[in-house]
Amino acid sequence: MKKAKSHNTAHVHFSDSPALSPMIEDDPTDAALEASSPSSAFGRTGAASAGGVTSNLSRKKATLPQPTKKLVIKLNKAKPMLPANFEENTWATLKSAISAIFLKQPNPCDLEKLYQAVNDLCLHKMGGSLYQRIEKACESYISASLQSLVGQSEDLVVFLSLVQKRWQDFCDQMLMIRGIALYLDRTYVKQTSNVRSLWDMGLQLFHKHLSLASEVERKTVFGLLKMIESERLGEAVDRTLLNHLLKMFTALGIYPESFEKPFLEGTTEFYAAEGVKYMQQADVPDYLKHVEMRLQEENERCLIYLDASTRKPLVATAERQLLVRHVTAILDKVAVGFMILMDGKRIEDLQRMYLLFSRVDALESLRQSLNQYIRITGQSIVMDEEKDRDMVSSLLEFKANLDRIWEESFSKNEAFSNTIKDAFEHLINIRQADPANEDLVDGIFISALSPACQHLVRKEEWRGIDQAIGQRGLHQCVSHGSLEE
């Protein structure tokens, strides 16, 4: 009967190891028989003789011990296999959790188990498939959420509140999904080019379906513009709602084109109409106060709910419609109104005018108005012969008022300072141009000087000073209140 063959295959490996000397143990019985044998004596003698020869021969033929082969047996272990439906079953667990998040239902699975499910799929090179499945699931719910806004409330504020609620829900849901699939974000997404993070993927989907629901986007923009217009007209509005929705536009990357462009166009129309209306109804000081208030309001909007990038074009638009377009009209009114402001020493109103004109590069027009005012007012002082004895004191008082306005209202602008000096030189030249008035001017001039200057002027050599020096002295007197020695 043949032995059955074994089906287990053994792998045999031989490894070198030091040789062991063979050991042969003598049987005790054999030893006893050998001792009792008659030939044992001879055998021992012969053996001794033969053993010596053999020993000599062995020593000559001796070689180093050779290594023996070591037997090693290894059994092949089979690689563990994934369950047949591992990917589908794991995704089913995650899909159920994602659905619960979007439907605002209790999560049927422990979070730790969900984290481990994502980790397992990524470790087995299934991250790409998982990413696509998550994207598809999110898109389905985001699309349905935005489509549900179509045909909603006609009340714009109510509608905007619904949009804001959808946006807030979306943000909360995507944060939860990203938290569960954080390992996917840190491995597959990070290691794969041209793949958005889960958060950015969600934003792209929200943007896509907001654009597809064109009625929702159009109505949202229209509602935002109407709320801001209402606020400009003095109504109270929900600034927090405006802030949240405009941040949504910024996060989606559609703020400049979808909101800012129509917003600036609406701002242009609003302030163009308002500028014309107020210029017809208000005097210059009141109009400038209104302009100043409007510019402050627009700056405040940028701080509270508009994106910071809007501030510069927004303020420039308001300045252009309220100031630049009306500079000529303002200065025409200033021909009368400016004199009233100057004569009344309206420091604050003049300062406001200066600051607003400086914003739109209109200071040169204001400087020319100042020059015209000094010449007209100063000439009425210089040429009034009935008040000759009060002329210099009146001019000095006039100059002191101008200096105060120049310092407090015109920010010590050097060009304005030069304008004041040039205008006074013109006034002095007008009065001294008539030789009949020379003695009168000299007398009035001397009376306005400090005692030290009067002593200098009364010296005999004063009469020999030429006309140019006399004019310079009077100008110094009027400009500084004393004569330079």
Image (cartoon, grey):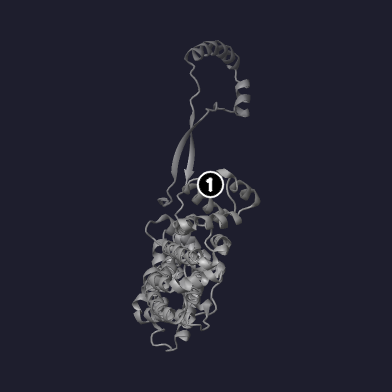
The local secondary structure at tag 1 comes to helix
x and y percent of residue 174 in the render?
Answer: 48, 70
Residue found at the very far bottom of the displayed protein = 154
Quarter of the figure that contains the C terminus = top right
In the displayed structure image, the side of residue 242 where residue 447 appears, left or right: right
Q: Where is residue 305 shown, x and y percent of the image?
A: 50, 72
Residue 142 % position (x, y) = 42, 76
**456 versus 271 height, above or below:** above
For the point 47% across and 84% down, the residue is: 157
Q: Nearer the viewer, residue 461 or 255?
A: 461
Q: Is residue 85 visible?
A: no
Local crowd at mark 1 within 10 Å, few (<14), some, or many (≥20)? few
Residue 322 sits in which quadrant?
bottom left
**Residue 383 visible in image:** yes
Give residue 162's position: percent from left, percent from top: 47, 83
The residue closer to the viewer here, 118 or 35, is 118
Q: Amino acid at mark 1?
A: Arg
The front one of 311 and 165 is: 311
Total labels: the figure holds 1
Q: Nearer the viewer, residue 188 or 151?
A: 151
Residue ID at (53%, 58%): 440
User: Which residue: 57% across, 64% down?
Assistant: 390
Residue most extreme to the right: 451
Above or below, 361 relative to 68: below
131 relative to 440 in the view: left or right: left
Residue pointed to by mark 1: 463
